[in-house]
Structure formats: structure tokens, C-alpha cells
Image: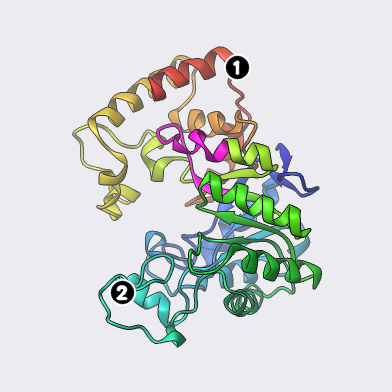
Amino acid sequence: MEYRRLGRSGLKVSIVGLGCNDFGGRWDLEHSREVITRALDAGVNLFDTSDVYPSPAGGEGPPGRSPQYHGDVLRGRRDEAIIATKFSRPTGEGAALYRAGVLDRAGHDTGEAANVAPRLLRQGGSRRHIIHALEGSLRRLGTDYIDLYQLHGPDPTTPLDETLRALDDLVRDGKVRYIGCSNFEGWRVAEAAGIADSARLTPFISTQAEYHMLDRRIEADLVTACNAAGVSVLPYFPLASGFLTGKYRRDEAAPEGTRFEMSPHLPGRFVSDDAWDRLERLEAFASERGRPLVDLAIGWLASQPHIGSIIAGASRPAQIDQNIAASEWRLDAAELAEIDEITLG
């Protein structure tokens, strides 16, 4: 297993991390325990969750159950894990309103409600919510500190300076070790780095973003900003919610039990004639080298120097081993150029 430093920090994370959205939703405690334990035993040390997981994509389950399961499994092995959790999405009663479409991802009224009581708006990057959210996360995870505390998404209603100062205080108090962000555009990463530098505040060391071979939009600005600011990218949806696993075939029904079969909205998000054309060329590329498509998806990400850790889900323990083995594939310059031609050409 390769371990990489996150940003300019001394924190070293496994190249393959474990995304924990399914725990507490699609998977019960005992199944979650099997997967998490296998990850720990295999050397995975980065575990990514959120105070709203499982989200609807992770199956039916109350928001916050995923970190509860995680804390239960890690009891006695806390020192082996780097817990990365997130805040800012609507929690408490606000989580139900978010799922019902009354609030958007940032906790703002979508127009479905004329007015939402402030007590429901437990969301965002304000000092008040950050402290409230951290206390809840520590309780659910059964720990007294968070290794990597991440702003789940931008909060345009709160000055970024306020968010960074509140997070800096938590680091100084010892309740948080490092901080990161998620779903930021490049200019926001640059702005955060500038504020932290000028005010001598704790900087972000990582940012999460959707990133895989068929969606490389972040390379236009986010990757450049991260390189300049010393911020690592933590890609989520590295397999395009399963589209890059090789499970699916053009003009065929999704296999029973797969994400596309269980979540009918997903194919519309990832699949098009152009995507199928590129997918089939990628599959041929991998096959010529005696590899399955999933190995190429993970190996291509692991070959990118701006990647800190690949946040990959796993539905069973064996997938942990498969993801780790795939991460050992390093594409050479000629192979990377061929992937560029397939995915960007």
C-alpha cells in the first residue's frame, strides 16, 4: 500500500481510502464491521464519512448512523484510523427537509416553503453551526478528536474568514487535527489559501471532488489551484457510481442488485452514447493489458500526482483487496496520453 502526504502537511494517508456513505443505510452494522475491519487489516487508514451519512444515495437510514457504526467498529483501533468527516449539510430536522426537497444541499429554501424556522437550519459554515456539528460528530464517532474535518460544500451566506477562524480554533483546542473542504471551485480554494496565509490560520490540506476518467472537469481550474495552494485532491465517485466497473453493457438492463438497478436516476447522470463509446474504448485498453476496467479506473487516478487518497466505496471485504491491488498499477506517459485521447479527444 502506498501512503501519500495530504497537501503540505505531515499527515500520510493510504492511496485507497474507504467511503462510508453506505454504512447504516444499504449495509447493517455487522456487514459494515466486516468491510471496515478488512480495510483496517489491509492497511487502509483513511475513512471518509459525514454527519448526514447515509445520504439518500447510500440507502435508507437516518442521517448520522454511518459515523455511529464507524465509531462502534473502530473502538479499540482508533489509533489505526484517520477519520475524515464532513459538516455543513442540513442536519437534525433540516435533514428531513433536505431529503424532501424543501432545502437545497446548502440548507437554503428551495421555494417549497415560504419560511423555514431558524431552529431547522442546522447547516452551513457559521461558527455556531461548526461548533454544534463538531460536538455531534464527536459523540456519534465515540472519539475526542477528528483527524480531518471537512466543509462539505461552500456556504455563500457565511464569510469564509469566519469559517476558517472557527476551524482554526478547533485545531488549537485539539478537537481537530487538520481541515479540508469539499465541492469547492478552484477560486474558492485559492481564496481560502489566501485568507489562511494572511491571517496565519490553519489552511485546508485537501479538497474532495467528483473525479474519474469520464469526468475530468476539475482539471480546468481546481487542480491548478490545488497545486498552487498545496492542497491534495480526494476524488469521490472514482468508478462513476459503478459505470466504470465493467458491470454494465450498452442496451442491456442493469444487473440485479447493482447501483444502477437500485437507483434508477443514476444512469441518466452518467450514461450517454458518447460515454458508452468512451467506456468501450477504455475497456478495450484495459483488456489489452490483461486488466479489468475497474483496475484502470483506480490505477489511472493513482497515477495522478495531485491525488491524495481515492475515496472508494466497498460493498464487501473482497472489494477492499481489489481496490488496493488496482491502485498499484501505474500508467506510463504513453498510456496516460492514450487515456487522454480516449477521454478528452
Quarter residue 68 falls in: bottom right
The spot of residue 36 in percent (x, y) is 60, 57
Residue placed furthest toward the front: 198
Q: Is residue 44 left or right of residue 95?
A: right
Residue of label 2? 102
Q: Which residue is mark 1?
A: 332
Based on the displayed image, in which of its 4 quarters is residue 299 positioned? top right
The three-letter code of the residue at mark 1 reads: Asp
Q: Residue at x 41, y 75 (%)?
A: 95
Amino acid carrying mark 2 in the image: Val
Label 2 SS: loop
Query: Which sits in the foreground, 261 or 8?
Result: 8
Residue 101 in the image, given as x and y percentages of width and height: 30, 70
Furthest residue in direction left, as rendered: 251
Q: What's the CA distance linking mark 2 and mark 1?
A: 48 Å
Asked if residue 25 is positioned above or below residue 255 in the image, the reply reads below
Q: Report the span colored magenta.
A: 207-223
